[in-house]
């Protein structure tokens, strides 16, 4: 075991584990993982638990234990391929030596053992094919993406299982500008007498080329992309109407939403999950912004026949919130909530405050006794007290809020928060 092998990060080790699960060898053993990553068996078991949680959330895959000592990856072929797509790209970014020393050589060896025509997986031929695809796509692949495509093609050429798509997914991919390049790729393999299920493989490579492309409004001109642009414009208009707040830089917001929504639609159509760690915090801190975003997104989701998850809605709400702050040239408002002996009352007041404005609030707490003795910290813009108190000599604006907070008080608080 080399000294360097013990320096792999947790992210690198999880990536190694997933890549090894895709190799066409016998079931992966825990001891082998411990040796490759330079860690203990206990650390490997923790890595396995984290990988299992990750692939369930993002790709609806599971780990299977055919024996007490070995692991296999189980799930639908399309989900498996999409998981490898993300894992291999991440591997080439965070652990390229591992990919080229422990993953790619085994793929080439397997293709030789299966007597696949060497011209199909020869690296020079594959690079020429990749350049042809780039020309058809009118794009330039970065060197790392070229290497990714080469290795991924070698993996697919060694596969015996085809992906399955439902009718909605096939229709979605049929309208993509990447389809022509995908068709020519599969046509090339057919000419070399390699048995390929044409419809599903063209669909898959259309999807893969979509994943390699970062959507950009100023560069995308296909009818499906122009349709998305119009849908984004309508989405922004609905948000402005619902929020009662116009955006001065609609172009900048539209560019960011276009990139994000194009990728979100791909995730929704192919059941790819995203990180959910912020969802609960966004729901608690920005309830009105989140609710407004969900309302204006519904026509968009209906138009594209998708269901946007809570996580997806939360990310879009964050985009709208950031642009609201930028438009108003405001920093996050510092609000001081005075506390005493009624925690439930204080919690309800805080929740109603967050419901009053679309803008983010930073709410801190101070006891009424400390406030009367020391006053509010300097950065505080507004003090809210559920209790009747005597004001200190100097303080920011203070609102005595009782439940239910009156309409007049709500208007005053909103004016103070959004000015």
Image: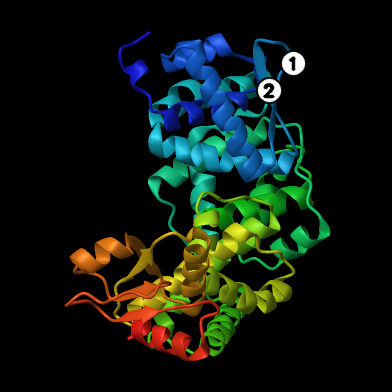
Q: Position of residue 60 (x, y in %)?
A: 69, 41
Q: Position of residue 317 (x, y in %)?
A: 51, 69
Instruction: Find residue 80 and report its image quarter.
Output: top right
Q: In the image, is residue 317 above or below residue 245?
A: above
Is residue 374 rendered to the left or right of residue 3? left
SS assignment at label 1: loop
Residue that badge 1 annotates: 66
Which of 295/373 is in front? 373
- Visible residue check, residue 95: yes
- Quadrant occupied by the C terminus: bottom left
Mark sitting earlier along the chain (1/2):
1
Q: Which mark is residue 298?
A: none
Is residue 98 rendered to the left or right of residue 167? left
Which of 99/124 is in front? 99
State the residue at coordinates (26%, 71%).
380
Q: Is mark 1 in CB contact (under 8 Å) with mark 2?
A: yes
State the residue at coordinates (51%, 18%).
44
Label 1, residues with CA under 10 Å away: few <14, some 14-19, many ≥20: few
Q: Which mark is residue 72?
A: 2
- Visible residue check, residue 150: no
């Amino acid at each position: 075991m080399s000294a360097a092998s013990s320096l792999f990060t947790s992210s690198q080790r999880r990536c190694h584990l997933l890549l090894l699960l895709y190799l066409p060898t016998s079931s992966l053993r825990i001891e082998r993982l411990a040796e490759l990553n330079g860690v203990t068996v206990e650390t490997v078991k923790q890595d396995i638990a984290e990988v299992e949680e990750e692939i369930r959330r993002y790709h609806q895959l599971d780990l299977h234990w055919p024996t007490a000592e070995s692991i296999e990856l189980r799930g639908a072929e399309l989900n498996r391929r999409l998981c490898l797509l993300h894992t291999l790209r991440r591997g080439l970014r965070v652990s390229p030596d591992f990919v080229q020393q422990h993953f790619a050589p085994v793929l080439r060896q397997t293709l030789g053992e299966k007597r696949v025509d060497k011209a199909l997986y020869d690296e020079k031929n594959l690079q020429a094919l990749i350049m042809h695809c780039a020309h058809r796509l009118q794009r330039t692949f970065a060197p790392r993406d070229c290497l990714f495509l080469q290795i991924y093609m070698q993996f697919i050429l060694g596969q015996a299982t085809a992906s399955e798509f439902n009718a909605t997914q096939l229709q979605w991919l049929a309208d993509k500008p990447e389809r022509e390049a995908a068709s020519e790729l599969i046509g090339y393999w057919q000419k070399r007498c390699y048995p390929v299920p044409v419809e599903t493989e063209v669909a898959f490579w259309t999807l893969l080329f979509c994943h390699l492309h970062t959507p950009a409004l100023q560069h995308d001109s296909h009818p499906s992309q122009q349709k998305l642009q119009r849908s984004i414009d309508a989405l922004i208009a609905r948000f402005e109407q619902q929020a009662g707040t116009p955006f001065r830089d609609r172009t900048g917001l539209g560019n960011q939403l276009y990139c994000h929504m194009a990728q979100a639609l791909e995730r929704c159509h192919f059941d790819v999950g995203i990180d959910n760690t912020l969802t609960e915090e966004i729901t608690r801190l920005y309830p009105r912004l989140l609710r407004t975003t969900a309302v204006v997104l519904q026509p968009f989701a209906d138009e594209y026949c998708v269901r946007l998850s809570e996580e997806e809605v939360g990310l879009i709400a964050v985009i709208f919130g950031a642009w609201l702050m930028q438009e108003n040239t405001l920093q996050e408002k510092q609000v001081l909530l005075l506390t005493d002996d009624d925690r439930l009352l204080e919690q309800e007041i805080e929740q109603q405050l967050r419901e009053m404005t679309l803008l983010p609030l930073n709410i801190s707490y101070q006891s009424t006794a400390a406030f009367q003795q020391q006053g509010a910290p300097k950065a505080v813009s507004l003090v809210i007290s559920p209790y009747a108190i005597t004001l200190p000599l100097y303080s920011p604006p203070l609102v005595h809020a009782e439940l239910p907070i009156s309409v007049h008080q709500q208007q005053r608080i909103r004016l103070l928060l959004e000015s």
